[in-house]
Image (spheres, rainbow, N blue to C red):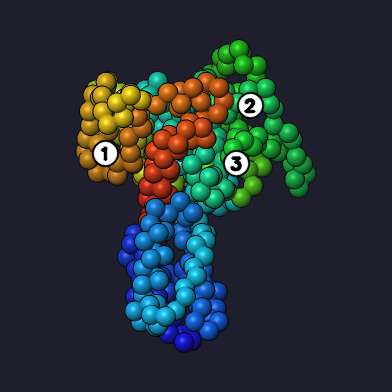
Amino acid sequence: MDKNDILKALATVQEPDLKKDLVSLKMIQDIEINGLEISFNVVLTTPACPLKEKIEKDCIDAIHKLVSDQAIVKITMTANVTSNRSDKLTLPNVKNIIAVASGKGGVGKSSVSSNLAIALANMGAKVGLLDADIHGPSVPMMFGVLNEQPMMRSIDGKELMVPIEKHGVKLLSIGFLIKPEQAVVWRGPMVSSALRQFVNDTDWGELDYLILDLPPGTGDVHLTMLQIVPLTGIVMVTTPQAVALADAYKAATMFGMTPVKVPILGVVENMAYFTPEELPENKYYIFGDGGGKTMANELQVPFLGEVPIIMSIREGGDKGTPGAVLDASAKKVFNEIAEKVAQQIAVRNATN
């Protein structure tokens, strides 16, 4: 056996999303041969790849079939998150920027943002979360850091804010700079100025994903973020009710009307159904059934998943420990959503 034999075998293994073989995609690295033992690294496009087990199995099968059925194959799955950003002037060390949006308030957008950030971080990605809801900041409460304040750091003679870190996620919110009971009574220009500071005057460091928790609706904040931040894509959050869906459609339309078209990565349906603990096989669609899937179909974007009504998600948000940390069922739901979001980003980065 030699490295060329192994590369020829692995050249028959296709990356399921990108539709190209692993060798031409340069995903195979550090091949070593020691007798019958073959070891190498497979470098994925994201640590949240939902197909990593399939890719690993296909590699082992290819080597057993085309090189030696006696080979002992040891694969290390690593990741180098891809980016397709051409504009590096703003947030140059951030590979992908995801905005989480909704048409109306109360649909759980901040809850989805927080748990999505934690899920990506738990999978090994470097993640930041910017609370862009100036008038209703909720990230400090959801992460249990209400009384913390960001430190300042001098870099090249410029004073920059240092995000608060919790659960592996870098956090920044206007809530860190005001008292919890204090209202932010600002006009549009002041809000836009604050957001520019959060983006440009913060030491975010190197991030694979920066998640922007946008306020509900369509207004100043959305236009400001579209102008100053090179967004990778949008995750739309809705609940099944017709009134929530109607407003979500309007928000989705806004992102297609701006001079810079921002792709929608998919739709998340929150509070989709309720399953009592004593009846684990039952699903009660309290607010309606299938609205998020219908919206995704009409927008011709992926449906990223349903988030059921889980007590731990609500309790975790109130107590400062998001559901993706506390509860196994919540963690599973948000891991699946995070994998699909990362998958959509990786495909877009490879094809655009």
Secondary element under disc 3, as helix, strand or loop, is: loop
Amino acid type of the residue that numbered disc 1 sits on in the rendered structure: Ala
Name the residue type under label 3: Gly
The type of residue carrying mark 2 is Val
**Under tag 1, what secondary structure?**
helix
Question: How many callouts does the rendering have?
Answer: 3
- The quadrant of the picture occupied by the C terminus is bottom left
Q: Which of labels 1 and 2 is toward the front?
A: 2
Q: Which residue is mark 2?
A: 145
Circle 3 sits on which residue? 168
Give residue 49's quadrant in the image: bottom left
Q: Is residue 61 left or right of residue 282?
A: right
Q: Position of residue 110 (x, y in %)?
A: 47, 28
The relative height of residue 57 versus residue 102 in the rendered view (above or below) is: below
Distance from the alpha carbon under mark 1 to that under mark 3: 31 Å
Q: Residue at x 41, y 35 (%)?
A: 329
The residue where tag 1 is placed is: 296
> In which quarter of the view is residue 203 placed?
top right
Name which of mark 1 and mark 2 comes first in the sequence: 2
Instruction: Say whether residue 195 is left or right of residue 28.
Output: right
Mark 3 or mark 2: whose residue is earlier in sequence: 2
